[in-house]
């Protein structure tokens, strides 16, 4: 596959995410897909991935993902990603806060035969949880990052 075709597949994944219909992932994600292998965040299989998306959609019904940068090399596509949504539903045991938050991530998608078979991601969950109000600064943190404390 060409680099442009691989990037188009990843763009399709993000577009499917933004439609909030996990069934649309069938077109882009391999059945034996794996996310973040060898980490506690590992996800195996298309159906497991769909369940995770469903959790995000329930917690953030207006969630929209944006590709900030996209680069392809070989069978990999690298993306700098931003997701924005309002926390109006329960998410990972966190009661709705009504806060609009932004999630930033870097993702590497590996594509084989027109399907994403693997992706690895680095997600700024610390900032995400701070924005939700789940994590509070210590007194030292407030001194180090006064502009972040509200």
Image: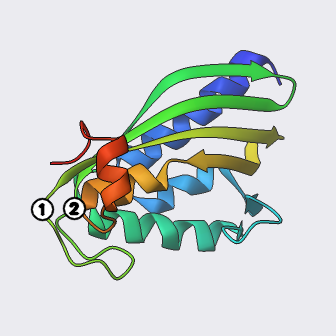
Q: Position of residue 48 (x, y in %)?
A: 61, 73
Residue 103: tell me if it is visible. Answer: yes
Residue at the image position 34 percent from the left and 83 percent from the top:
93
Residue at the image position 60 percent from the left and 30 percent from the top:
79
Q: Is 43 drawn above or below residue 149 in the view shown? A: below
User: Horizontally, is 139 left or right of 9 in the view?
Assistant: left
User: Horizontally, is 119 left or right of 129 in the view?
Assistant: right
Structural distance between the alpha carbons of marks 2 and 1? 5 Å
**Between 150 and 93, which is closer to the camera in this rendering?**
150
**Between 149 and 50, which is closer to the camera in this rendering?**
149
Q: Quadrant of the N terminus?
A: top right
Q: In the rendered picture of this protein, how many numbered marks are placed on residues?
A: 2
Is the C-beta separation of discs 2 and 1 under 8 Å? yes
**Between 149 and 89, which is closer to the camera in this rendering?**
149
Q: Position of residue 103 (x, y in %)?
A: 40, 46
* Disc 2: which residue: 87
Q: Position of residue 133 (x, y in %)?
A: 24, 63
Q: Is 94 drawn above or below residue 130 in the view shown? A: below
* Disc 1: which residue: 98
Q: Position of residue 31 (x, y in %)?
A: 74, 64
- SS at mark 1 in the image: loop
């Amino acid at each position: 596959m060409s680099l442009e075709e691989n990037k188009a597949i990843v763009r399709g994944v993000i577009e499917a995410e933004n439609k909030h219909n996990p069934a649309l992932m069938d077109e882009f994600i391999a059945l034996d897909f794996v996310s973040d292998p060898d980490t506690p965040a590992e996800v195996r299989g298309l159906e497991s991935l769909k369940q995770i998306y469903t959790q995000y959609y329930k917690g953030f019904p207006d969630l929209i993902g944006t590709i900030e940068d996209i680069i392809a090399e070989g069978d990999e596509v690298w993306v700098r990603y931003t997701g924005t949504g309002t926390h109006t539903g329960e998410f990972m045991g966190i009661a709705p806060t009504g806060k609009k938050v932004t999630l930033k991530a870097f993702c590497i998608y590996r594509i084989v035969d027109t399907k994403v078979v693997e992706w690895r991601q680095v997600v700024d969950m610390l900032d995400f949880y701070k924005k939700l109000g789940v994590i509070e600064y210590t007194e030292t943190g407030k001194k180090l990052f006064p502009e972040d404390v509200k």
